[in-house]
Image (cartoon, rainbow, N blue to C red):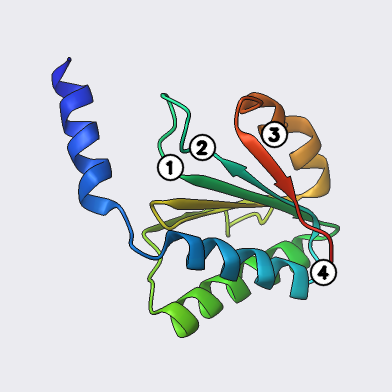
Amino acid sequence: MSIFAKNFFRMRIRHENDNTEEVLATVVETMLESKAKEVTSLDMRELQSAVTDYFVICHAQSKTQVTAIAEKIIDNVRNKLRVHLYHEEGFENSEWILLDYIDVVVHVFLEPKRSFYKLEELWADAERKVYED
């Protein structure tokens, strides 16, 4: 095993979260309450190359709504679960906002960007769950 792989494995163990399922549920609930479209989770736990346990993906029709959904997720996860965001990206242009909670990585897309990047197809081996509002 390479040094990179050993360090990565240690990093994943160290950051594993006891309430991953609660974070997932809160993110999904917030997306649905915020009128996000096509809310989908990908269970990555069985994939060898996965860097997280879950991806949660949705899209919105406007940049304003993309930002609002992402901000609401941050607020709800922090206030309900006392879990703080590890990393965020994409607020500058609000076409694809990524919220990293280590074990749950959230992707809030502007609709055309979701269609272009097709994360669900890229991770087609992951178990997929689509949520209805």
Q: Is residue 108 left or right of residue 54?
A: right
> Residue 71 appears in which quarter of the rendering?
bottom right
The answer for how far apart the CA atoms under marks 3 and 2 are is 11 Å
Residue closest to the eye, 107 or 83: 83
In this picture, residue 93 sits left or right of residue 48: right
What's the residue type where badge 3 is placed?
Glu
Task: Tell me the SS state at disc 3.
Answer: helix
Please give the residue where the numbered disc 2 appears in the rendered image: 44
According to the image, label 3 marks what residue?
120
Tags 3 and 2 touching, CB below 8 Å: no
Dot 2 amino acid type:
Met
**Separation of marks 1 and 2 at Cα, in angstroms:** 7 Å
The residue pinned by badge 4 equals 35
Residue drawn at x 22%, y 23% as measured from the top left: 5
Q: CA distance from mark 4 to mark 2?
A: 25 Å
Vertical order, 71 against 52 (above or below): below
77 is higher (above) or lower (below) than 130:
below
CA separation in Å, label 3 and label 4: 20 Å
Q: Secondary structure at mark 4?
A: loop
> Type of residue at label 1?
Thr
